[in-house]
Image (spheres, rainbow, N blue to C red):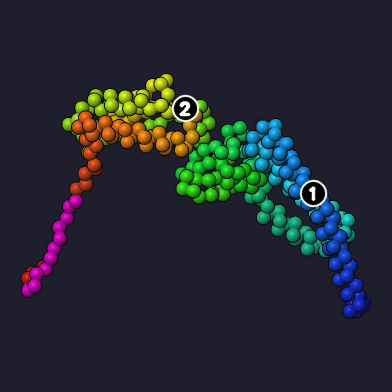
Amino acid sequence: MAQPRTIDTLIGELVAVSQDALVLAVVTASIYLPARYLLVPGVKRGLRALDVDDAITLPLGKLLWAAFSGFALFAGVTVSGLASFLAATEAITAGATVAVGFASKDVLGNLVSGAFIVLDPTYNIGDWIRWKDNEGIIEDISFRVTRIHTFDNELVVVPNSELTANAVTNPAAKDRLRVSTTFGIGYEDDIERAESIIIEEVLANDDVVDRPGPTVRLAELGDDAVVLDARFWIADPARNDFVRIRSDLTTAIKTRFDEAGISLPAPQRELSGAVSTTGAGGDA
């Protein structure tokens, strides 16, 4: 029959555990701190000096940090003697292992996806990407998530598995990008004249490349306007350039249309219905 533990025994066990915890803290810190503040920054500086892309440098730095953190904790537990304490509580350890296993399922999937993203040359820090109904600039790629800065100045944290499971478009991956914009003119306006004005203004813009040349096609005979679709190419595309160039051309073309008497008709909406009022003493 087990003898009840005395207060002295409990105090002795508490002191022993406290000593082990102190050894754990000292050993862990002695490994973790130099790695965190000396080794990892040094590796990052070395990679950047070799002109290695940040899409590889940043995740590799985090991988080193995580590896040394795990090693520091393992060494601390081993040296401190807490390993024997954990072994004595096998049921608790087994339960915690199962719980962690279920909780880490998605994390492991995102880790694998993150590795594919880092190794994929189409993903780089600073790239403009589109996925689903979202778009933005890649700001950081980590083990579990990719951080994307949207054009509404929001920071979106996207699980890596979402990017690898869906189609992702990189509009700026190539050296040229085709831009398309539409203009609606009145049915009574000269279509050929409108097309000529659009071509002239597109070619006059220094940001548009000459080859392939711009094109204008009649896209639709709408209810309110004849819709012309203008397509042209820009070099070294970036999101800000894309918006600015299209805005500049739209402004210049509208000015030329006004001078030529070509209208840009507003959509016409027909309202129907009736309002019924009841006068004093009258019938509804």
Identity of the residue drawn at 38% across and 21% down: 213
Identity of the residue drawn at 68% across and 52% down: 104
Q: Residue 235: which numbered mark, if any?
A: 2
Q: Residues within 10 Å of mark 2 (few under 14, many from 20)?
A: some
Quarter that holds the N terminus: bottom right
Task: From the top left corner, tell me how far across and down residue 169 is, in percent.
Answer: 50, 36
Q: Which residues are magenta?
A: 271-281
Judged from this view, the residue extending furthest toward the left is: 282
Task: From the top left corner, tell me how far across and down residue 238 is, in percent.
Answer: 49, 35
Q: Is residue 40 visible?
A: yes
**Amino acid at circle 2:** Ala
Residue nearest the viewer, comparing 82 with 139:
139
Quote the CA–CA distance across marks 1 and 2: 46 Å
Where is residue 256, by image quadrant? top left
Quarter that holds the C terminus: bottom left
- The reply, left or right, for residue 9 in relation to residue 248 is right
Where is residue 14, by image quadrant? bottom right
Task: From the top left corner, tell me how far across and down residue 229 is, in percent.
Answer: 32, 30
Question: Secondary structure beneath disc 2?
Answer: strand
Identity of the residue drawn at 46% across and 48% down: 152
Identity of the residue drawn at 68% across and 39% down: 57
Q: Residues within 10 Å of mark 1 (few under 14, many from 20)?
A: few
- Does the magenta portion include 104? no
- Which residue carries the number 1 mark? 34
Residue nearest the viewer, comparing 78 with 274:
78
